[in-house]
């Protein structure tokens, strides 16, 4: 018989054996019955254990009660060993089995999420067949500094955040910070740095809410930046403020060219600084876009206000 498998004693691995009673459903009767099952170590368990030993120096460590534990990512481990052909749940059960045999130890750290950390248990030395494996275990047992010296890896202390239960339905990986949810204020603040314009736009949003026709974030963005929105009507903050205030005064749902009745009566058509000819181009801004949803947002077509 081969003496070692994956650097662990095959003779000792065979000795890890116990009988358990589990509930299993009888396919004929549909009733759950007690069944005895034999739990042993196999080659897959030893491959996983070898992976843990080999990658131990590069794993994230914490110090718990003077003993070093490493965070184990099921996802990364399975990705490193595709030939095992095991899923996440089966992988977790194999680790749990080695914990129950005393080969590994397990702690759950709750800190901005729940994370599973593993260390080497007292029965690990029965399997260890290399000087390296013995050094890791003996350094752990004597002092956490011994492990640091051997592996030269930093640790963190999470002693106050430990749940010693070995129940582990899933090992969560650190979550990425989610992008803050977009709000009316964030949209307005990113659109302009002008305090007066920001205030006017906030009042416009408030008015739409009071009309029981609140804007979606997308609708507000369209009203500000589309060709027929605020950017298309004016090029200066002063003009934009006047347009927004005009909309508020008339309780309109969108933005429209500035009304200047006296100018229309007494002056010839002229262009504003934005290039808009108030008499020639006015009708353009009230024409339908051909998309009713966009017309609703911008107040165009049949949704345009009465200009008389």
Image: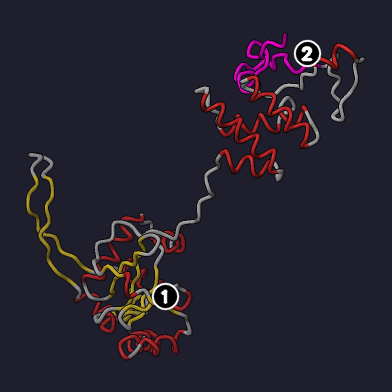
Say which residue appears at 28% left-offset and 74% top-offset.
Answer: 105
> Per the image, is 276 magenta?
no
Residue linked to disc 2: 283
* Quarter-of-image position of residue 68: bottom left
* Quarter-of-image position of residue 226: top right
* Quarter-of-image position of residue 198: top right
Say which residue appears at 24% left-offset and 80% top-offset.
Answer: 123
Residue linked to disc 1: 61
**256, 27: nearer the viewer:** 256
Q: CA distance from mark 1 to mark 2?
A: 69 Å
Which residue reaches farthest top?
Answer: 308
> Per the image, is 287 magenta?
yes
The magenta span reads 282-308
Q: Earlier in the sequence, mark 1 or mark 2?
A: 1
Crowd tier of the residue under label 2, counting other residues whose Cα lies within 10 Å: few below 14, some 14–19, many 20 or above: few
Q: Residue 228, how many percent across, how many down?
A: 73, 24
| Quadrant location, the C terminus | top right
142 relative to 206, above or below:
below
Residue 176 as seen in the image, left or right of residue 306:
left
| Quadrant location, the N terminus | bottom left
């Amino acid at each position: 018989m081969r003496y070692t498998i994956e650097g662990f004693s095959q003779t000792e691995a065979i000795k890890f054996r116990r009988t358990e009673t589990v509930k299993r459903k009888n396919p004929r009767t549909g009733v759950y019955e007690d069944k005895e099952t034999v739990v042993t170590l196999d080659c897959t368990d030893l491959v996983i254990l070898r992976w843990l030993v080999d990658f131990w120096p590069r794993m994230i460590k914490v110090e718990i009660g003077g003993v070093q534990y490493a965070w184990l990512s099921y996802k990364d481990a399975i990705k490193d060993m595709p030939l095992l052909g095991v899923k996440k749940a089966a992988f977790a059960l194999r680790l749990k089995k080695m914990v129950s045999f005393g080969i590994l130890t397990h702690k759950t750290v709750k800190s901005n999420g729940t994370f599973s950390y593993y260390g080497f248990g007292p029965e690990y030395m029965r399997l260890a067949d290399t000087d390296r494996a013995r050094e890791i275990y003996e350094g752990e047992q004597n002092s956490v500094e011994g492990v640091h010296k051997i592996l030269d890896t930093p640790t963190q202390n999470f002693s106050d955040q430990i749940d010693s239960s070995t129940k582990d339905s899933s090992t969560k990986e650190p979550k990425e910070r989610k992008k803050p949810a977009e709000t009316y204020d964030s949209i307005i603040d990113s659109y302009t740095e002008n305090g007066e314009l920001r205030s006017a736009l906030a009042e416009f949003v408030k008015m739409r809410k009071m009309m029981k026709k609140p804007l979606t974030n997308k609708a507000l963005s369209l009203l500000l930046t589309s060709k027929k929105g605020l950017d298309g009507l004016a090029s200066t903050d002063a003009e934009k403020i006047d347009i927004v205030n005009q909309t508020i005064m008339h309780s309109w749902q969108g933005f429209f060219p500035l009304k200047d009745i006296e100018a229309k009566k007494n002056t010839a058509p002229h262009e504003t600084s934005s290039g808009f000819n108030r008499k020639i181009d006015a009708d353009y801004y009230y024409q339908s876009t051909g998309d009713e949803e966009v017309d609703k947002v911008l107040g165009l077509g049949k949704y345009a206000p009465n200009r008389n």
